[in-house]
Amino acid sequence: MIWKTHTRQFDLSQKGLTMGVLNVTSDSFSDGGQFLDPASALAHARSLLEAGADVLDIGGESTRPGASPVDEAEEIRRVLPVIEALARETRVALSIDTMKPGVARAALEKGAEIVNDVTGLQNAEMRELIRSTGCGAVAMHMKGTPRDMQDAPFYGDILEEIRGFFRQTLEACLRSGIDPLCLAFDPGIGFGKTLAHNLTLLRNLESLRVGARPLVLGVSRKSFIAKVLGTSPLEDRHWPTVALTAYGRIRGAQIVRVHEVAPNLQAMRMTEALLAP
C-alpha cells in the first residue's frame, strides 16, 4: 500500500506512520494556546520529531466541538512561519490541517506536502489544488461543522453512511484528475459521532476502506475516552490512546494522528511485529 505526495512516497504495506499533532491555535481542546507562539510551536515540533514522528500535522484553526471559525488571513498568519521554518530544518513530511484552499495553497508553497481536510475534500477548489500540486491528502468524514457537529448526531447505519461518503469522495477525486495513490481516508472519530458511534467505527475500521487506500485514525486524547473511563483529566487519556493505537493498527489503520509520539510509535511497531507473517 503506497501513499504519495509530490516529493515522496510512503510504503505502508508493513509499517504504519505516526502523524504528530502541532496545534498553532488558541483554543484546541487539549493544548490550546500552548504553541500559538512560533518559537513554542517550533520547540514542540522538534520534540515530536525527536520522538520519531513520520509526519507533522500543523493546524491553525481548532476543530474541537463548538469551535468558532478562524478567518483565512489569521490562519495563514499562525501556520506559515512554523511551516517555513520546519521546511528549512527537517526532511520529515509536513501536513497542513485546514479546510480552506487558500490556507492549503499557502502552506504547500512554503514546504508542506500533505493537506489534511476535515471537510473531506468536498470543496472543488481544494480538489483542484490537490490535483495540480500532486500533494498527499487526507479526506475526513465529519457530520455538520465543528460548531454544531455534536448536537445530537444521528445515523441510520453509520458504517454504510461513512463507506458511502468515502466512495463518493474517491469518485469525485478521480473525476477531478487526482492520483488515487495520493489519497488517505479518516472516519473522523469524534466529529459528529456519539460514544456508541465511535466504538462501532473502531470495531469495524477495515470495513470502511475504499479503493485500497490507507486509513487514518485520530483518537488521541479525545473525550470519548473519558466517557468510557468515567474520568475527565487529559492525562488520564494518555495510555488509553496508546491502547487504541495498537487496536486500531490491528483493525486496519495505517496512519495514527497523535499528541504523544513515542509511546504510540512503540505500540504500533510492537503490534506490527505480531501481525507480521
Image (spheres, grey):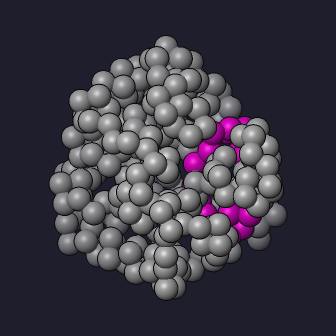
* Residue 174: image location, x then y, percent: 26, 71
Is residue 51 on the magenta stretch?
no
Q: Main secondary structure of the magenta part?
A: helix
Q: To which quarter of the image does residue 112 belong? A: top left
Residue drawn at the location 49% of the way across and 51% of the way down: 65
What residue occupies the far top of the structure in this picture? 39
- Regarding residue 92, the answer to whether it shows in the image is no
Residue at (32% x, 49% y) in the render: 99
- Picture residue at 65% right of the left edge, 35% below the top: 52
Residue reaching furthest front? 151
Count of numbered marks: 0
Q: Quadrant of residue 166?
A: bottom left
Residue 62 lies, in percent from the top left, at 44, 40
In the picture, residue 122 is in which quadrant? bottom left
Question: Is 265 within the magenta?
Answer: yes
Is residue 123 shown to the viewer in this render? yes
- Horizontal side, residue 92 vs residue 271: left or right: left
Left/right placement of residue 172 relative to residue 275 reads left
Query: Residue at 36% across / 25% down in the picture?
Result: 78
Residue 143 vs residue 111, the one in the foreground: 143
Position in image of residue 151 (x %, y %): 48, 63
Q: Nearer the viewer, residue 224 or 1?
A: 224
Residue 40 position in % (x across, y down): 53, 17
- Vertical comparison of 130 with 32: above or below: below
Q: Magenta segment, which residues?
A: 246-268
- In the image, 269 versus 249, the foreground residue is 249
For this view, does 167 lie left or right of residue 190?
Answer: left
Of residues 146 and 78, the one nearer the viewer is: 146
In this view, 54 is above or below 269: above
Q: Is residue 189 above or below residue 106?
A: below
Locate the C terminus and report the quarter of the image it occupies. bottom right
